Image (tube, rainbow, N blue to C red):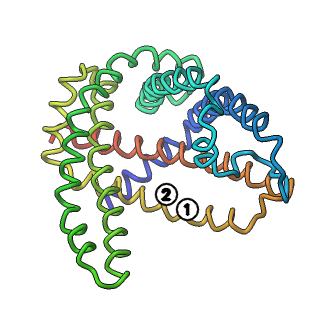
Amino acid sequence: MISANFLKFGFNRAISKFKLSLYLWLIMFIISLIIIVPVSYEVRANLGHLAWTEKPLLPFELNLIEIFLANQNLLASYSVFIIIMLLFSALLSVFLSGGLFGQMLSPEARVSFRDFLVDGCRHFWQFLLSLIIFIPFLLIFFLVFRLLSAPLKLWSARAVTEWPVILASWLTVLLLALLWTAFRLVLDLVRIFVVGESKRAMAAYLSTLRFLHRHFFRLWSLYLLIGLAVILISAGWLLLVKLLSPTSPAGLLIIIILSQAYILFRLLARQVLIGVEASYFSARKGS
């Protein structure tokens, strides 16, 4: 029952601050256009001489990996641009996370784009430092994953039928997802400590580890419950998209609209998760 209260609080907080998802979606959409449009133009310009049995509506329906391997100079003129934009996108992600956590943890019910940007600036450096400190945790993550997945790889290598191989691959993916959520939980709580408790990055990590020592499995179970709901809804969305044909303009338009709606859904789910984590932390930080 208590867990349901945390989930309800997180959902209500996300819905009341749904504008944050709109801000994030709009920024991501604009940045994606800046990156994709020149690349799309370059692909069309260089592949326009090819004969198509049916002209694709999108150039990215092609197997771009094979195309780039066959013509490695295809995007040479945009390589520096792409690298710069990827670096910019990584830094922008840190900035947006600062704005998102800042507004989600704010007691103010009102959300404004200006306050979102101010929080992004306020927490940028501590969030960036927290990511740098997170690098050793990533190394531990990969080490633990390799150790735990080793028996599955051994079982798959010794299999005489295909079913153990398939099952082992599924279990490996499941193991990877479970471990990643556990380590991602650490980073989320660090950010909550930075924003909610005004702690510096290193102090936030120490406080997070102490807090998770007492509350890890309870909070992790809430994280996994939200993740399961997202997976089920995503599966339903994927089945719906599969029923549509991308070869017709109407079908393609509907797929694009559904894709953007799905991005908004994932952003809202992220807000729900932060709301649940913040609610649990607020209720248990003194225990």
Does residue 185 appear left or right of residue 28 in this picture? Answer: left
Distance from disc 1 to disc 2, alpha carbons, whole Å, reads 5 Å
What residue is shown at x 78% (from left), y 63% (from top)? 245
Residue 82, located in which quarter of the rendered image? top right
In the image, residue 12 sits, relative to residue 105, either above or below, namely below
Residue 275 coordinates in the image, percent (x, y):
41, 42
Q: Nearer the viewer, residue 278 or 249?
A: 249
Does residue 164 appear left or right of residue 69 in this picture? Answer: left
What residue is shown at x 75% (from left), y 35% (from top)? 46
Inspect the image, locate mark 1, and give the three-letter code of the amino acid beneath it. Ile
Inspect the image, locate mark 2, and give the three-letter code of the amino acid beneath it. Val
Residue 209 coordinates in the image, percent (x, y):
16, 38
Label 1 residue SS? helix
Q: Residues within 10 Å of mark 2 (few under 14, many from 20)?
A: some
What residue is shown at x 28% (from left), y 25% (from top)? 132
- For label 1, the residue is 233
Label 2 residue SS? helix
Question: Label for residue 224?
Answer: none
Residue 173 coordinates in the image, percent (x, y):
36, 62
- For label 2, the residue is 230
Q: Nearer the viewer, residue 67 or 245?
A: 67
The reply to whether callout 1 and callout 2 are in contact (CB within 8 Å) is: yes
What residue is shown at x 65% (from left), y 33% (from top)? 74
